[in-house]
Amino acid sequence: MPNVTVIPATRNLHTGVRNDAVAKRKTAGYARVSTDSEEQLTSYEEQVDYYTNYIKSRPEWEFVNVYTDEGISATDTRHRSGFNQMVQDALDGKIDLIVTKSVSRFARNTVDSLTTVQKLKEKGVEVYFQKENIYTLDSKGELLITIMSSLAQEESRSISENVTWGKRKRFADGKVSLAYSSFLGYRKGEDGQMEVVPEEAETVRLIYRLFMQGQTPYAIAKYLTDRNIPTPTGKETWRHRTVENILSNEKYKGDARLQKCYTVDFLSKKRKANEGEVPQYYVEGSHDAIIEPAEWQLVQMEIQRRKNLGRSHNCCSPFSAKLKCGDCGEYFGSKVWHSNSKYKRTVWQCNAKFKGESKCATPHLYEQRIKELFLEALGILMENREEVIGDCRAVNG
C-alpha cells in the first residue's frame, strides 16, 4: 500500500488569501429602509450608526463604508444606487466582506439575490447575514441563501397583494386619490379631498379654449412654453402628450375613472394600461369641476372628429379641417401665393386637387371670400336662432 502524505491547504479556497496572513478584511455594511416615514428614517439612521460601530469594534475587520438606500423597495435592485455602488466596489477589490441585517434587507427577489451573491463569490467577496447567521462562502451558505431568499420573495408578494387589495377596496368605495405633484389644477384639501387651485385651473381652461379655437396639442404646448407657464410638474417645457392628457382627463369635469392602470408584476413593478384585465370604477361628481361637463364633451367630440380626418390637423386658421370639398369630399387646405411679394395672398383649395388621375375640379377660394361667406351664414343662423335652438333642444330631449 503506497504511503500518502497530506499537504495542508495554505490558502483560503474562496479568497485565495494565505491562512496564516494577518491582514484585516476590508468590511462594509449595508442598510436599507423601504419607506420615507419618520419612524423608518429613525431606523435608517440607527442602522448606519450601528454598522459603523459594529465593524470598527472588530479587530480583524477594516472599516470601509456603510452603503445605504433610503425609501427604496428591495424587490428590484436596479434602482438601488447604494446597493449597486457597493457591489461595484466589491467587484473592484475594495471590499472583502459585506455585513447586512438579513436576507430581506439585501433583496426580496430570489434571482437578484442569488445572482449578486454568486458574482461576489467569484471575486472572493463574502456576505454575512446577521439575522440568519449565514456566511455565503460557507459550504451551507448557498443552500441557506436560496431558501431564505425564496421566503423573503413570498413575503414581498404577500405585502404587494395586501396593498393591491386595499387600493381596489378604496376604488370600489369611490375614494379618489391623485398624484397631486404632477396633476394640474388640483391639490389635496384640508379634508383630504380634491381642491381646485385657481391659478392652475385658469391654465386648464386656457388649454380647452385654445383647442376649441382650432389649435393642436403641439401648438398649445408651444404657446404655453413661450409664455413661461409651468407644466404640471413645474417644468418649463410643455409636451404635446401632456396637453392631450389634460384634454381627455375626465377629472376636469368633476368625475373620476379609477384603476386606469394596474401593476402587472410585483417584482418588476411594471404597470400596464387597463384594457379590461381588472375592474374599473367610474365615480360621477366626485369633486368640483374645472371644465363644465358639456364643454368637456364637446372637446372629446372634436378630438374624435380630428382623428377621423385621417390626416394631421393644421391649426393655422379657424377654418382648418372645417371646409369640405363638395366635389370629392376632401378637406380644403390653406396655401400662400406670392409669399415674397406685395401680391401675397392666402388661398384655400381642395387637398386632392392635384392628386390621382381624376383631379378635383373645385376652384380655389380666397380667405377674404371665405370670411364673407362665414358672416353671411352666421347672419342667416342668427335670424332663425329661435328655430335652431328649438331644434337643438328637441334633439337633446
Image (spheres, rainbow, N blue to C red):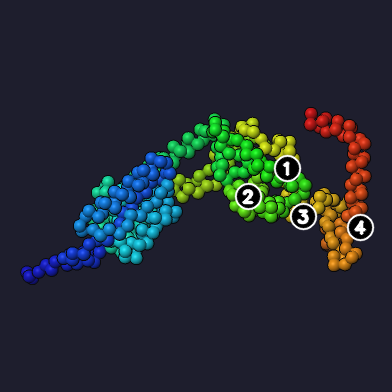
Q: Is residue 131 above or below residue 11?
A: above
Residue 375, given in percent of the width and then of the height, sits at 90, 45
Packing grade of label 1 (10 A; few <14, some 14-19, many >=20) is: some
Check the image and name the residue furthest to the bottom: 2
Q: Could you tell which of marks 2 and 3 lies nearer the N-terminus?
A: 2
Q: Is residue 357 above or below residue 268?
A: below
Seen in the image, is 195 located left or right of residue 394?
Answer: left
Which residue, given by chain and number where applicable, does mark 1 sit on?
A: 299
Depth-wise, is mark 2 or mark 3 nearer the camera? Answer: 2
Residue type, numbered disc 2:
Pro
Checking the image for residue 230, the label placed there is 2
Which residue occupies 31% across, 54% down? 29
- Which quadrant of the figure contains the N terminus? bottom left
Q: Could you tell which of marks 1 and 2 lies nearer the N-terminus?
A: 2
Residue 381, given in percent of the width and then of the height, sits at 90, 39
Depth-wise, is mark 3 or mark 4 nearer the camera? Answer: 3
Check the image and name the residue furthest to the top: 397
Element on which disc 1 rests: helix
Which residue occupies 29% across, 53% down? 52
Q: Could you tell which of marks 4 and 2 lies nearer the N-terminus?
A: 2
Q: Could you tell which of marks 3 and 4 lies nearer the N-terminus?
A: 3
Residue type, numbered disc 4:
Pro
Q: CA distance from mark 4 to mark 1?
A: 32 Å
